[in-house]
Image (tube, rainbow, N blue to C red):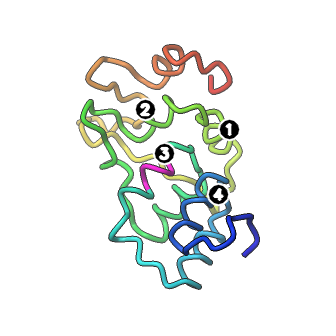
Amino acid sequence: DMYVSRVGSSPRERLMESIEQDCLCSHFAYLADFYKIDIAPFQDLIVDKAIEFASYHCLCWLQKENNIDLAMCQDQNNNNFLHRIAATKHADRLFAQIAQSDSRLELKIPDNPRSEKKESMYFECNDEGGCLLHIFVRTDNIRAL
């Protein structure tokens, strides 16, 4: 495949390394198809890794090709996937890609499932009353702002 991975890596390890490298959607599709990877048994690990590394392309792939509902990816403090990404050191990478997104790959930011007004998840507050901007400031992530 087109990206660097460790020699002797299993298909699952290659997939996880591709998330860290923020490989393109086509690469995730290639790996899953070529190696016949069924992501269902470790879907939560893939989503968590994509959030940890703020992998725009992996999140697009999960959403479009695997029908993962990112609105349901909340932690125990009701941090949605955007809150969780905002708290990572890679947050600026994802938000820059959202701003420059190609409409064919566009990551769909779901409406807040807890909002009666169907507000965007961008404005949703977690249990501590923090939204994305609060998290950026709290984590001193100036680049993501």
Q: Residue at x 59, y 67 (%)?
A: 14
Q: Which numbered disc flags the more N-terminal residue, 4 or 1?
A: 1
| Nearer the observer, 19 or 64 | 19
Task: Tell me which numbered mark, 1 or 3, is placed earlier along the sequence.
Answer: 3
| Secondary structure beneath label 2 | helix
The residue depicted at 53 percent of the width and 77 percent of the height is 32
Q: Quadrant of residue 57?
A: bottom right
Q: Quadrant of residue 8?
A: bottom right
Gap in Å between the C-alphas at discs 3 and 2? 10 Å
The amino acid on which the numbered mark 2 sits, given as a three-letter code, is His
Amino acid at the residue labelled 4:
Ser
Q: Which residue is mark 4?
A: 103
Task: Name the spot of residue 141 as percent of width and height, x first.
Answer: 60, 21
Residue 137: horizontal and vertical position, in percent? 53, 14
For marks 4 and 3 on the same chain, the one whose residue lies earlier in the sequence? 3
Q: Which sits earlier in the primary sequence, circle 4 or circle 2?
A: 2
Crowd tier of the residue under label 1, counting other residues whose Cα lies within 10 Å: few below 14, some 14–19, many 20 or above: some
